[in-house]
Amino acid sequence: MDKASPIALATMTALLAFSGVAFAQDRAQSPLGIPPAPTPRPNVILIKEKRADLRGAVKDVLDAFKTGAKDLRIDTKENMRSATSSTERREIEKNAIEQRRVLIDARKASTTEIRDRRKELAREHVGKIGQRYSVAIKQFDNLASRIQSRIDKLRANGTDVSKAETALALAQTAISQVKTDARALADLLAQVNSGDDAKALRAQIEAAVKKVSASIKLAHKALEKAGKALVQSARTQKSKNMSATTTIIQ
């Protein structure tokens, strides 16, 4: 049996148990060369802050329009009272209409800019969601591949790895479910072309995100069990080898 196997297998299980895979905090790259998944929290906070900024910008635009329209009405009334001829009154009305048009155009320009920023924020959010789950799936595949590699080596040394194989098969099924759920979410996210689209699809996207998150947790647990089963197989074989050696010596 490969003497380094128990150490490598223990490292594998520790990685599965403590990295959190899809929910890891920032850590250095693992001894197995598998980087931790990105922490979603900072991105979530940043996006919420940007949304709050946009809501504040909308309020500022509306407040500025209301204040400008109110001031225009007051000035127009005062000018009309001071007017001494119908010609002057018509000129005041004409100017008031033109100034109101300027206010409306300014409001439209500002709201259009904000709408574009909302669209960009929606696309940014969509991209981060897709990226996060792609990283998690890639890590799962890497971990499953490493566990399979250790199973093959142990089997070649005559170790009973049936439990580990069963656990890994369940983990691979769980990983397939993650991919299916992530693909369904990606199809929804692909429909988001603007902030309005994101708002209309929000309930469906939130449900899909929850489903993927639940699948990721199940896959993580399944991989953890597979890693532990692999370690147990190695320990059992090691105990048998030690017992056999002791018997020969006696």
Image (cartoon, helix red, strand yellow):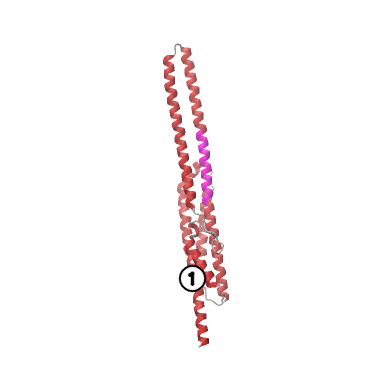
Q: Is residue 192 above or below residue 76?
A: below
Residue at image location 47% in from the left, 37% down from the top:
57
- Is 125 included in the stretch rendered in magenta? yes
Q: Could you classify mark 1 by the number of other residues whose Cα lies within 10 Å: few (under 14), some (14-19), or many (20 or more)? A: many
Image x and y of residue 175, in percent: 51, 61
Q: Which one is in front, 178 or 107?
A: 107
Q: Is residue 141 visible in the rendered structure shown here?
A: yes
Kindly identify the amino acid type of the residue bearing the numbered disc 1.
Ala
- Is 233 included in the stretch rendered in magenta? no
| Quadrant holding the N terminus | bottom right
Residue at image location 48% in from the left, 46% down from the top:
47
Q: Which one is in front, 215 or 54?
A: 54
Image x and y of residue 204, in percent: 46, 49
Number of numbered discs overlaid on the protein picture: 1
Which contiguous range is marked in magenta?
110-129
Q: Is residue 168 visible in the rendered structure shown here?
A: no
Image x and y of residue 148, in percent: 55, 68
Q: Is residue 5 above or below residue 98?
A: below
SS of the residue at dot 1? helix
